[in-house]
Amino acid sequence: MKNTEDLIEQILLEGQKIIIGKEKQIKLSLAAFLSDSHVLIEDIPGVGKTTLAKTLSHILGLRYSRIQFTSDLLPSDIIGVNFYNTKDASFSFKKGPVFSQFLLADEINRASSKTQSALLEAMEEKQVSIDGQTYELPSPFFVIATKNPYEEVGTYDLPSSQIDRFAISFSLGYPDFEAERAILSVNNKHSIDDLKSLTKEEIELLQNKFKTIHASTEILDLVQEILKFTRESSLYTVGLSTRAAITLLNISKAWALISFRDYVIPSDVLEVLPYVTHHRLQARNEYKTPSEIVDEIVKKLHIDT
């Protein structure tokens, strides 16, 4: 069996055959998966959000399911439904698409808040409840949700409780000239089905390695300094929660693992901080990009980068 470094290199190399020029986004998605959390991708249509999800699911060897969110989608369309069996006069549960290992919630903000909330228990507890009965979801259970800009017709705000279930948020953006030329080139076409997939044992090896990553007191101090600043500063409407702190620490550990280290360093925290705070911190008086928020925090706390 390959070691963890070989497996991480394989994931990144295979992913970049399809998602060209977006190594950072592939790493962030992998970090979320390794830390047993979820990803929100906010971007315009057509930049590769769905392709990223399908590529990762194949590389990780996970059972993939996709839900297209629409205004008329119901919670039962996601979770499943109890139906009456006339043959034996009993109720049976028909599982919905949420019963997968890798779920793509496509255009999640096109559905109503009630339907969006159907994912809350699944993402947090790895289970769903219906009519007083609880059903366990497959393991691992990983969600990538895509979100269209609010300026588009037919979109709804995501509830703060739903937003907080996503560990990280990022945009793919347009590819640069060279990457786009490679995408357009017939000679550089790769099929997702041809990519190498990890086995269940290899996934478990990576997950077990993640649990051994060490965060020192210095790292914990840094995380708490960041929390304190966001809560006490008048710059943001709401500071970072304790859940956000745990998320920041876990994503930092996963980033250290992807960087082939078994311990976290300050630059790991600062590297992932923009993507953990992007959907959680809102400036009071003006819009700020994730990098501007981090620059602000680093400057105020006098952190040496």
Image (cartoon, rainbow, N blue to C red):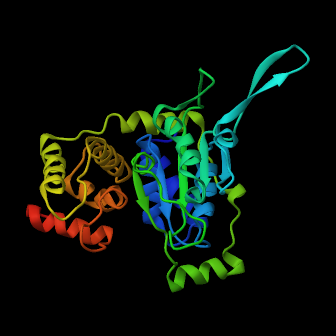
Q: Note whether residue 305 is visible.
A: no
Does residue 304 appear in the picture of this structure? yes
100 in relation to 42, above or below? above
Q: In this view, which residue lies farthest toward the right?
A: 87
Q: Which quadrant of the figure contains the C terminus?
A: bottom left
Residue that extends furthest to the top in the rendered view of this protein: 88
- Please, is residue 32 above or below residue 146 in the view? above
Q: Position of residue 6 (x, y in %)?
A: 47, 49
Q: Is residue 64 above or below residue 138?
A: below
Between 76 and 127, the one nearer to me in the picture: 76
Displayed quadrant of residue 37: top left
Answer with left or right where residue 251 lies relative to residue 205. left
Tell me where residue 277 appears, x and y as whole percent: 31, 58
Q: Position of residue 82 (x, y in %)?
A: 73, 27
How many badges with numbers are in the image? 0
**Horizontally, is 170 left or right of 141 in the view?**
left
| Point 58% across, 81% down: residue | 180
Residue 28 appears at what percent x and percent y? 42, 56
The residue positioned 45% from the left and 36% from the top of the image is: 124
